[in-house]
Image (tube, rainbow, N blue to C red):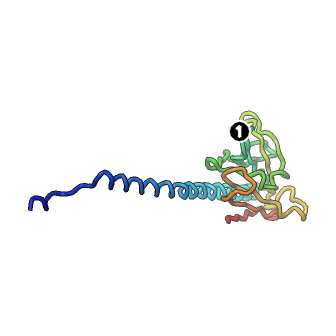
Amino acid sequence: MEQMMKRRGFSLIELLAVVAVLGILLVLVTPAFNSIATSSSITQATNLISGQIELARQLAAVRNRTIELRFLKKTGEPFSALQLWWPGLNQSAEKPVVLPQGILLNESLSPWLATMGNGTMPVGTSWAEATYRSFAIRPSGALESPPAAANRKNLYLTISAREEATPSNYATIQVNPDTSRPILYRP
C-alpha cells in the first residue's frame, strides 16, 4: 500500500523531451509573430499617411489656403516621417509624424515621389536640414500641380519594411488628383 501511495515524478529524460518540443515549437512560431508585427506596423503607417492626407484636405478647405504634405528624410536614411506645411507662410501646420519603427516609404516602388517638389527643411525646425518631397493640395481638394493624363495612374506610394524591389509585405496608397482622396491597397 505504501508503494502505491508514493508519487512518481518526471524523469530527466521526460523533462528534456518536453523542453525540446517546446523549443522546436517556439522556433517555428517566432517568424509568424514577427510577420504579424511587421504587418501591423505597415497597416499603422498606411493609416497614418492616409489620415495626414485627409487632414491636409480638410485644413486646405477650412483655411481656404493651399497646404503641402512633406515626406521627410534625414541624410542617408529612407523617408520615415511626414509633416503638413503652409507654403505661403513657410511654417508648419502640424508637428512631424514619424512612421512606426522599421517602416518606410519604398522609393523604388513609389514613382510619385520622383515627381514631387523637393527641398530642405529650414533651420529651427525639428527636422532641420532634412530633405523632403512634397505635394500640395488646393482648397478645392485638387492637387496643386496635377500630372498629365498619362501619369495620373502613377500617383501612388508604397509602404514596406525594407527598401526592396519586390517586398513580401507592403501596402500602397493611391491619391485621386481631382479630390486628393487616398485609396488604400493591401494585398
Identify the image quadrant of the N terminus.
bottom left
Image quarter where the C terminus lies is bottom right
In the rendered image, residue 28, in percent from the top left (x then y), is placed at: 51, 57
- What residue is rendered at 27% in x and 55% in y? 10
Q: Is residue 132 visible?
A: yes
> Which residue is found at the position 63% from the left and 48% from the top?
102
Instruction: From the viewer's side, name the closer residue of 24 and 11.
Output: 11
Left or right: 140 in relation to 96: right
Q: Please identify the quarter of the rendering in which residue 46 is found.
A: bottom right
Q: In the rendered image, which quarter is residue 184 located in?
A: bottom right
Q: Residue at x 71, y 39 (%)?
A: 127
- Please provide percent x and percent y for residue 79: 72, 46
Report the amino acid beneath label 1. Answer: Trp
Neighbourhood count class around disc 1 (C-alpha, 10 Å): few under 14, some 14–19, many 20 upward: some
The image position of residue 74, as x and y in percent, is 72, 39
Extreme-left residue of the structure:
1
Can you say whether 48 is above or below 122 in the image? below
Residue 145 appears in which quarter of the rendering? bottom right
Circle 1 is placed at which residue position? 127
Q: Secondary structure at mark 1?
A: loop
> In the depicted view, which residue is nearer to us: 31 or 182?
31
Q: Image check: 29 left or right of 137?
A: left
Which of the pair 161/185 is nearer the observer?
161
Asked if residue 93 shows in the view, the reply is no
Q: Where's residue 84, x and y in %? A: 72, 49
Q: How many marks?
A: 1
